[in-house]
Image (cartoon, helix red, strand yellow):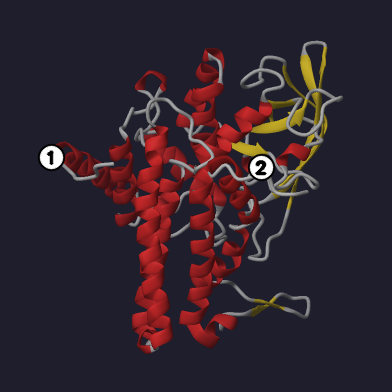
Amino acid sequence: MDVRLGPALEEFGDEVQTWLEEHMVGPFAGLRGRGLTGQEDIAPELQIEWERELAKGGWLGIDFPESIGGRGCSLVEQVVFHKTYVEAGAPGRIPNLGLTLLGPTLMMFGSAEQQQRFVPGILSGDELWCQGYSEPDAGSDLANVRTRADLVDGRWVINGQKVWTSLAQFADWIFAIVRTDPESSRHRGLSYLLVPMNQPGIEVRPIVQITGGAEFNETYFDDALTDADLVVGGVGNGWKVAMGTLAFERGAGTLGRQAGFRREFEALLDLAKRNGRWDDPVVRQELMESHIRLEILRFNQLRMLTALTNDRAPGPEMSIMKLYWASWHRHLGELAMMVRGTSGMVDSRSTHDGHGGRHYPLDAEQRMFLFSRAHTIYGGSSQVQRNVIGERVLGLPREPR
């Protein structure tokens, strides 16, 4: 991909920069350079409002066609947007799964009616989505899904449980993989349903994380309902559609994440210079290695983006990106503790919690270290990604069971 900026792209970058400076004010002024997945120091409600502010400026779904409310930006323009966004110190983004996952999935696999019904609400920020994939016995092994949906009187009746449903407590809808053929097993008999969250048959229970927040949730379905036509890609084709969604997760959606990674690395580098850890040859070497791998991540991302051209869904090679960024960011968290030294073990602002214990508020490095441990697990564990690469990219025999 040629990312050299001509006059038109420079003008586009200036437009992005100007808009951000004009809108990072008022309630959003304190978000500059703050807020990412796993950083519970920012209220999710405020981050959701920032998504809606971006929508007002037409900056949600810049890659979507203009005919459905997007900007129709080229891949190079998308790169320019995300690069400018992080350089402006704009707020870290919440996991807007409707925008990054469901929207592209609907454009690839959904009917025209489904696209017109749901994509405009996603791009306006009016409808928020969560993802219903993993279950207690079907995490990385998604083919083991047991949540069931039966067609009764023209509506799907759903029973079962999902887990790790990010921001389900704020979501209006959930896209879920369910078993619509009770006699089926593994990859067969699965369907991809769109289900409203605000109904008596759905219960959301937050999961308190090691960082103290509750981004993740358990979601229970007890005779939950959705319309018969809210199946994406046809009944029984859920596995194919689900794999397409995961590929989008590992494709263009990582642009914003990568921009945040660069900001985290630069902040850590600055900290090492300020506290003297830069003079430690081991720390210095680790920082340089991390920088090199971050550049590899950037170039690999640009290469992977070519798979999103010509209306082609990204394929299993996107697992390379997931495996690489997850491992890199987990190592960056470990490196953050190395740079902090012993001060990273505690926080001097600790306070009594009123029950005989102490509460230690986490700073940016501590949150990154703790939350990044999850990266090699969620969205497909690193072990599963290696199997996907080996079997579906390299053509190796299936792993023995």
Viewed as shown, does residue 107 lie left or right of 33? right
> How many residues crowd around disc 1 within 10 Å: few (fewer than 14), some, or many (20 or more)?
few
Asked whether residue 36 is in view, the answer is no
Residue 190 in which image quadrant = top right
Residue 25, numbered label: none
Q: Quadrant of residue 238?
A: top right
The crowding category of the residue bearing disc 2, from other C-alpha atoms within 10 Å (few below 14, some 14 to 19, many at least 20), is many
x, y percentage for residue 81? 31, 43
Q: What residue sits right under mark 2 in the picture?
A: 168
Q: Residue furthest right?
A: 183
Q: Nearer the viewer, residue 333 or 367?
A: 333
Q: Residue at left 66%, top 20%?
A: 231
* Residue type indicated by callout 1: Pro
143 or 150, which lies in front? 143
Q: Earlier in the sequence, mark 2 or mark 1?
A: 1
**What amino acid type should be assigned to the residue bearing mark 2?**
Ala
The residues bearing labels 2 and 1 have C-alpha atoms spaced at a distance of: 43 Å
| 271 shown above or below 191 | below
The residue lying furthest to the top in this view is: 153
Residue 360 visible from this viewpoint: yes
In x, y percent, where is residue 85?
33, 50
Secondary-structure class at tag 2: helix
Q: Residue at x 33, y 28 (%)?
A: 71
* Mark 1 lies on residue: 7
Labels 2 and 1 touching (C-beta < 8 A):
no
- Considering the numbered disc 1 on the image, is that residue within a helix, a strand or a loop? helix
